[in-house]
Structure formats: structure tokens, C-alpha cells
Image: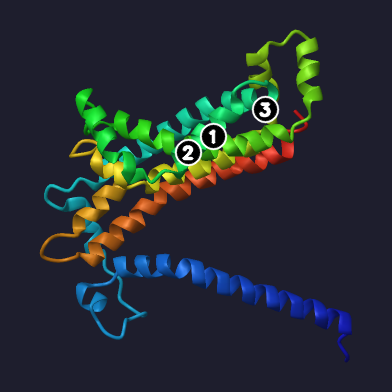
Amino acid sequence: MKVPLGKNRVVSEYLLYAVVILVVVVLFDLPMFTTILTAFKTDADISSSPPKWIIEPVLTHFQNVFQGVGFRFERYLLNSVIIGLSATALAILITFPAAYAIVRYKGYGQILMGATLLIRMLPAISYAIPVFVLFHHFKLIDTRLSIIFMHTLFIAPTSLMLLIGYIQDMPRDLEDAAAVDGANVLQILGHVLIPIVRPGLAAVAILGFITSWNEFLFAVILSVEKAVTATVGTSFFITSHQVRWGDMAAAITLSTIPTLIFIFVVQRQLIKGMTTGAIK
């Protein structure tokens, strides 16, 4: 029985796509895979050469993360979650009306955009000392509030640019129709724009939360004990005597879980907004 040439071509294309996807997954996810694998290795397997890929998994490093003396990783995770959610929500709350004003009203929007981009382009280390002195003056060192404020500054420029692009692509007729019906600006933003730009808000939320979660410089400068984040806490396994690779890998593995949960939840809103936002 002969197989049609067209079917052979389709099978070849699917195989090519599968190989490309496999290569991409291996290249981008191999570091994370090796980190997770290291978290389940014994210290002897971690230091073995050549590296062992088939192991008998152990949970010793995860126990060390949660039961280490003076190390409260559950608090660090909670701090990261609170700071990430708060900074992301605050950035969206500020930049969404700002993006609408820049697009729809003539004024100093371009100056605001330039100043915002300038903040994003400057090296963060260049204003580390002034920021520390400022927060120390207001007694905000080692508080979540100080880190939330700084992370909001990091998220805001990207959030503003993304939301400007979404609002520019929106038809003005919907806003005009709402205005004719007697809606004010706040009602237009809440009842007309938000359902339509929900995919943009979800994308901004994902990028903002990841930015806050991964930020290290100001998280370590502005924290001492109470406001330590998971990113900073993971670095505590690097001591003057040794690097505890297994414990560090376990902490990194645990740190990815809240991020994945947040992305999964927001991604559902992203898809829902793309399919139903315009209809509303």
C-alpha cells in the first residue's frame, strides 16, 4: 500500500516542528532542569565528575531550606509574594490612567514618557546610595514598603509603554459612545477600556511580577531581616567557607512555584480577555 506524497510531506513537517520545539526546550530549560536535579542530589552526587544524570532522589536539601538555623525561607517567600503583587498592582494603577491620558489628551505626555524611559535606562546602581539614604532618613529600611516602592519604579516604564500601545490600537468610537450616554472619564476607564485591554493588563501583570520577583540589588540594599525576599534569601547559602549548591538549588526550585502559579492564574485572564473583551 502506497502512502500519498502529500501525507508524507505533512508527517515530515510535523517531525521538523517537533525537533525544533525539542531543541528550543532543551536550550532554554536545561539550566532549570539541572537546577531541579541538583536539588534532589546528595552532596556526593553534586560534586561527582562526570555529572550524574540518573540519581536516587533525596529531600535533604529541602529540609535544610526550611529547618536551617536562623534561616526562615517561608517568610522570604511570603515577602516576595506580597512585594511582587503590591508593586505590580500599584504600577498598573498608576500607569493605566497615565497611558490613557498620554494617548487621548495633548499636553506633556511626551515629556512624561521621556522621563519614564530615562529612569528605566539608567543603571540601577547609579542611584543606589541616594535611595538608601532617603529611605534611611524616613526609617523605611528593612520594610516591605520601601522595596515595593522601588519595584514599582522598575515596573512602571515597561507597563506604561505596553499600555500605551494597547490603548492606541483601540477604536475611539467606543469611548465617544459611552460619553454620549453620559459616562465620565472614570466610568469610561472602568467599564469600557478595562474589559478591552484586559490582555494588555494581564501581560503587564506577568512581566511586572516577574521583574519584582527577580530583582536583587535594591532588595538586598533595603532589607536586613524582616523584609528579605526569596531572591536575597537564596544568596545566604553562599558563605565564606563554602557554597551549599544543593540547598541553593532547592531554594531556587521552591522560588519558582509562586511565579508559575501567578502566571497560570493571570494567563487564564489573558486568554479570557482576548476572547471576550472586545464583545463586552
Q: Position of residue 83 (x, y in %)?
A: 36, 35
Label 3, on which residue?
A: 103
Relative to 193, 114 lies left or right: left
The reply to whether the C-beta atoms of the residues labelled 3 and 2 are less than 8 Å apart is no
Q: Position of residue 162 (x, y in %)?
A: 60, 39
Return the residue nearer the eye: 129 or 46. 129
| Mark 1 closeness class: few <14, some 14–19, many ≥20 residues within 10 Å | few
Query: SS for tag 1?
Result: helix
Alpha-carbon distance for marks 1 and 3? 14 Å
Alpha-carbon distance for marks 2 and 1? 6 Å
Q: Which numbered tag is attached to residue 118?
A: 2
Count of numbered marks? 3
The reply to whether the C-beta atoms of the residues labelled 2 and 1 are less than 8 Å apart is yes
Label 1, on which residue?
A: 114
The residue positioned 53% from the left and 47% from the top of the image is 264
Mark 3 vs mark 2: which is more N-terminal?
Answer: 3
Given the image, on which type of amino acid does mark 2 rest?
Leu
| Mark 3 closeness class: few <14, some 14–19, many ≥20 residues within 10 Å | some
Q: Quadrant of residue 278?
A: top right
Q: Is residue 58 above or below residue 163?
A: below
Mark toward the viewer: 1 or 3:
1
Relative to 258, 49 lies left or right: left
Relative to 149, 174 lies left or right: right
The residue positioned 30% from the left and 41% from the top of the image is 218
